[in-house]
Image (cartoon, rainbow, N blue to C red):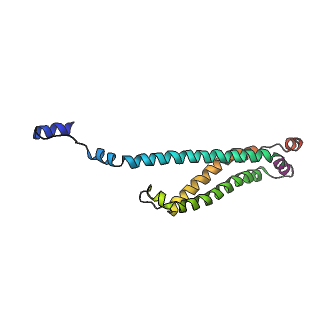
Amino acid sequence: DDARAVLRRLDPNMPLASIATMDEIVAESVAARRFSLMLLVAFAGVALLLAAIGIYGVLSYTVGQRTREIGVRMAMGAPRSHVLRLVVGEGVMLVVAGLAVGLGGTLAATRVIRGLLYEVQPSDPPTLALVGAALLLVALAASSLPARRAASVNPVAALRSE
């Protein structure tokens, strides 16, 4: 509004249809790309959440099915840390297998992905490593609760259950 007032004082006959600041012009020019990025971030967040829920569900089911085996291991003297490592290791192996499949899919879909990226190649090693590390952290977090549940199995109760 201040710019319009100054321009009207300078030349009252000048049409002032579209006056905007440089920030407004830049924001308008990148609005479509920003929307695509926000949509992509939202979908990536949902995918990460679904991956965590899936890993948690699979490991919880596996621990439930293997309660007797875990009880036998603990009755035979397996320390709690070994049981934790066993369950978390299963979760990590699921993610490593998923990362291998996902890496193959990423490399196969580079033409489609290339149009959505800015100054990053679809096969950029640091980006792929960062995504892999993030998924591994999610797997560790998702498998921690089933692993703690497995490590707290009472061997006597597990052996009596069947």
Residue 134 vertical placement versus 162 (above, below): below
The residues colored magenta run 69-76
Image coordinates for residue 21, horizontal then vertical, percent: 26, 44
Residue at figure coordinates x 61%, y 54% from the top left: 136
Q: As rendered, which of 80 and 106 lies closer to the eye?
A: 106
Image coordinates for residue 41, horizontal then vertical, percent: 49, 47
Q: As rendered, which of 69 and 51 lies closer to the eye?
A: 51
Image coordinates for residue 17, horizontal then vertical, percent: 20, 40
Query: Quarter holding the N terminus?
Result: top left
Query: Quarter holding the C terminus?
Result: top right
Q: As rendered, which of 47 and 141 lies closer to the eye?
A: 47
Residue at figure coordinates x 61%, y 51% from the top left: 137
Left or right of 74, for residue 123: left
Image coordinates for residue 104, horizontal then vertical, percent: 58, 62
Tell me which secondary structure the magenta stretch mostly adopts.
Answer: helix
Residue at figure coordinates x 85%, y 45% from the top left: 155
Asked whether residue 30 is drawn in magenta, I would say no
Left or right of 149, for residue 160: right
Q: How many marks?
A: 0
Left or right of 59, for residue 114: left
Left or right of 13, for residue 23: right
